[in-house]
């Protein structure tokens, strides 16, 4: 990665403009992520209520295989396409941009097709290894999903290189989960059972892939025509390391469910673990949309050598992630049994301890912010890869030690310890890279507000009878208490600026074309930016 030197200094409000642009993209991602998490939660709720926890456990295992093989198929091009599209736009290189997109999409499609064929043939063997022959049909149906989901991810990753989140949010975060929910509900209503739920996944994946390719094609047409120039060396070097890193990171998320299956804990235990994992994932849902908005801005700024702005948006992004996540974490720590009963009835209440342990691990993840994204987009993908490999290895070793003795609680401890360890390590690596840590006064105020809200939540739990009333009153009390303390302690300058940016009517145009005080990106960047105004949020 080269750092451009000799550019004129950024204008005094350059950082403000980047924060505003990132805020608008982040708010679009955040709103769409809320809808996505609601849809996925309802899919889980439907499966648990209509089919039972064992069938939900089978769905979780099969989906874990799809997630891992999806990243194997992408070969790291998700991060690579975002980064190199952003870089080629900044450097006014339309030929290289077109070549990078063709390489990334083409290789991802070919790899996913080959892997899907292997999964379809080997499905009975894998089902036997997981001690559940009933998984065979589901595994073959997710093999049918794999090429579509891979191409969709690659195409949406490329669109983010234009520093727009519109296609990613509307297709990946809204359409695909909503289509999956609607089709799953239809399949269950028609009595198609778990097989119907997997067919819903197939249809949603293929239709989302078609929309993603159309969105990418429209954006590429706005770039000046040029014969594609292929630079496989730089793309493969970055993407291969990013691939290992992403595969390790996703393995950290899903390996527990697979290891529980290998240890023959059965779909009941895996179903409980999956529900607890999904609840905790909802708590930190804000991390993914903020990362998606943060990454392209970071790649652009770091490539231009504007490290002061990199440090600033890193701190701002981390503050958003933690403070927006804290109320949900408080709810998980105070009402784990009640939340589990909401999903699957009294039989899931035994997973409360698992939920609390997982929540503590994710809380560390939220508090450290997008440190992994910063390492990736600043070109330190090998460092991030080693972090993820170390975390995955630690997780597997802890699982092998703890699952036989403690079951799903042991899996939760292994996951939480591994996740916390890798993120603490990344914070110090980022400190060495850009000379900052993501600690701000706003974060401290958020933690104070969370402690007050937690006290209020435990008070409600002690005073109110009945789990339903406890949950309804408690969630409302936690939110009111949290917001009251946050506003009483005062908002930071960045908070006020972000609120104005995302509520001001005229902000859409600025969000469409983030300002670059160091100079325009000349032909490609200017043309792409001008063409994007109507497409950005």
Image: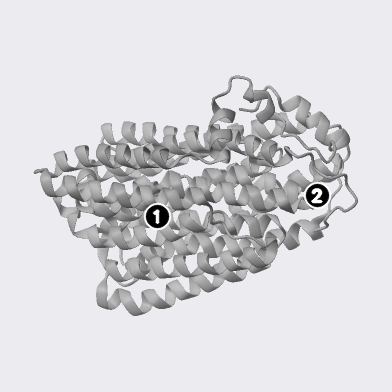
Q: Position of residue 295 (x, y in %)?
A: 64, 48
Give above or below for 295 relative to 263: above
Quarter of the rendering containing residue 188: top left
Q: State which tag comes first along the sequence, 2 or 1.
A: 1
On residue 160, the disc is: none
Q: Position of residue 30 (x, y in %)?
A: 50, 38
Kindly identify which residue carries mark 2. Answer: 304
Local crowd at mark 2 within 10 Å, few (<14), some, or many (≥20)?
Answer: some
Tell me how far mark 2 sits from mark 1, CA to CA: 43 Å
Which residue is pictured at 41% across the width and 70% down the height? 417
Please tell me which residue lies in front, 189 or 355: 355
- Residue, far top: 505
Local crowd at mark 1 within 10 Å, few (<14), some, or many (≥20)?
Answer: many
On residue 62, the disc is: 1
Which residue is pictured at 29% across the width and 51% down the height? 332
Q: Position of residue 167 (x, y in %)?
A: 60, 33
Q: Taking 112 as reference, is 473 left or right?
A: left
Quadrant of the image for the C terminus?
Answer: top right
Q: Taking 508 as reference, is 190 left or right?
A: left
SS at mark 2? loop
């Amino acid at each position: 990665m080269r750092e451009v030197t000799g550019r004129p200094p950024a204008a005094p409000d350059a950082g403000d403009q980047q924060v505003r642009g990132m805020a608008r993209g982040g708010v679009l991602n955040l709103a769409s992520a809320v809808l996505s998490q609601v849809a996925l939660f309802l899919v889980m709720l439907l499966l648990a209520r209509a089919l039972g926890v064992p069938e939900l456990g089978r769905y979780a295992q099969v989906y874990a295989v799809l997630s891992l093989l999806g990243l194997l198929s992408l070969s790291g091009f998700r991060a690579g396409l975002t980064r190199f599209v952003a870089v080629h736009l900044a450097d006014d290189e339309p030929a290289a941009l077109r070549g990078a997109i063709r390489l990334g999409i083409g290789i991802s499609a070919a790899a996913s097709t080959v892997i899907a064929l292997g999964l379809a043939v080997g499905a009975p063997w894998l089902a036997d290894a997981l001690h559940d022959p009933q998984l065979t049909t589901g595994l073959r149906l997710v093999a049918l999903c794999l090429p579509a989901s891979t191409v969709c991810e690659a195409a949406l990753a490329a669109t983010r290189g234009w520093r727009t989140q519109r296609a990613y949010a509307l297709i990946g975060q809204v359409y695909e989960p909503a289509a999956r929910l609607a089709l799953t509900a239809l399949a269950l209503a028609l009595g198609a059972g778990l097989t119907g739920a997997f067919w819903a996944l197939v249809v949603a994946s293929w239709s989302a892939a078609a929309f993603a390719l159309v969105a990418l094609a429209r954006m590429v047409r706005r770039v000046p025509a040029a014969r594609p120039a292929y630079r496989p060396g730089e793309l493969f070097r970055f993407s291969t390391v990013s691939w290992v890193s992403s595969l390790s990171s996703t393995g950290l998320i899903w390996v527990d469910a697979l290891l529980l299956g290998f240890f023959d804990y059965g779909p009941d235990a895996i179903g409980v673990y999956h529900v607890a994992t999904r609840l905790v994932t909802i708590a930190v849902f804000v991390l993914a949309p903020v990362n998606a908005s943060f990454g392209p801005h970071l790649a652009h700024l770091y490539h231009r050598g504007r490290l002061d702005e990199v440090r600033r948006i890193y701190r701002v992004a981390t503050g958003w992630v933690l403070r927006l996540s804290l109320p949900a974490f408080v709810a998980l720590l105070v009402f784990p049994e009640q939340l589990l009963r909401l999903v699957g009835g009294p039989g899931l209440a035994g997973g409360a301890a698992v939920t609390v342990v997982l929540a503590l691990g994710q809380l560390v993840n939220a508090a450290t912010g997008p440190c992994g994204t910063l390492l990736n987009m600043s070109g330190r993908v090998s460092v991030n890869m080693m972090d993820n490999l170390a975390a995955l290895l630690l997780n597997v070793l802890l699982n092998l030690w703890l699952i036989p003795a403690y079951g799903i609680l042991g899996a939760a401890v292994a996951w939480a310890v591994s996740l916390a360890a890798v993120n603490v390590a990344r914070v110090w690596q980022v400190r060495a890279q850009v000379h900052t840590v993501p600690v701000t006064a706003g974060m401290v105020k958020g933690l104070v507000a969370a402690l007050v809200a937690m006290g209020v939540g435990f008070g409600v739990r002690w005073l109110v009878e009945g789990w339903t009333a406890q949950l309804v009153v408690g969630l409302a009390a936690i939110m009111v208490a949290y917001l009251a303390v946050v506003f009483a302690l005062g908002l930071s300058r960045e908070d006020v600026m972000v609120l104005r940016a995302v509520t001001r009517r005229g902000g859409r145009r600025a969000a469409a074309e983030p300002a670059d005080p160091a100079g325009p990106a000349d032909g490609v960047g200017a043309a792409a930016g001008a063409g994007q105004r109507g497409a950005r949020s």
